[in-house]
Amino acid sequence: MSVTPVAPRPGVLPYQSLRAAADAGWITATAPIDDKQFQPASLDLRLGPVAYQLRASFLPYRETVQARLDATEAGDSELVIDRISLESGATLQRGSVYLVPLRERLALPPSVRG
């Protein structure tokens, strides 16, 4: 039995629609999505392998977030204080600003709204 990934009206996607969205490629990940990540109306997201400690939150303006991070690593900006590997775990400081890319990605079609 095939399940349609999208609910027929705007709102929260239930478990079976989230699962179907992953099967349809609307939700992808750098590592396979575990069954335990699917909740009744949500998907538990996983942190990626690196965290960026930032001086402050920012808006990328006309650049992508990745372009801003790359400029900092090239010495063109003072946005990033530290790049922290999360591969073996890490302790993050309370009150600091971090940007952590997720392992999951979304590519939702225009018909998904709500």
Image (tube, grey):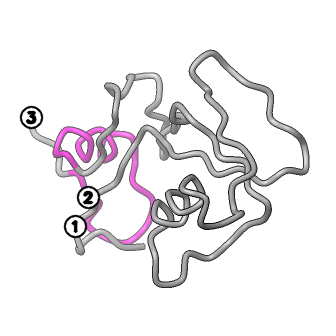
Looking at numbered disc 3 in the image, what kind of residue is underneath it?
A: Met
First in sequence: mark 1 vs mark 3: 3
Question: For the residues carrying marks 2 and 1, which lies nearer the camera in this image?
Answer: 1
According to the picture, the residue beneath numbered tag 1 turns out to be 109
Q: Which of 53 and 29 is in front in this view?
A: 53
Residue 96 vs 111, above or below: the answer is above
Q: Which disc is residue 6 wearing?
A: 2
Q: Tell me if label 2 and label 3 are in contact, CB under 8 Å.
A: no
User: Which quadrant would residue 84 be assigned to in this image?
Assistant: top right
Residue 24 vs 71, above or below: the answer is above
Q: Nearer the viewer, residue 110 or 84?
A: 84
According to the picture, the residue beneath numbered tag 3 turns out to be 1
Q: Which disc is residue 55 wearing?
A: none
Position of 104 compared to 17: left or right? right
For the point 34% across and 45% down, which residue is it?
18
Residue 106 vs 50, above or below: the answer is below
For the point 71% across and 63% down, which residue is it?
78
Position in image of residue 50 (x %, y %): 57, 36
Looking at numbered disc 1 in the image, what kind of residue is underneath it?
A: Pro
Magenta-drawn stretch contains 8:
yes
For label 1, the crowd category at 10 Å Cα-Cα, with few meaning under 14, some 14 to 19 and many 20 or more, is: few
Dot 3: element: loop
Q: Nearer the viewer, residue 74 or 43?
A: 74
Q: Tell me if label 2 and label 1 are in contact, CB under 8 Å.
A: yes
Dot 1: element: loop
The CA distance from mark 1 to mark 3 is 22 Å
For the point 24% across and 74% down, which residue is it?
110
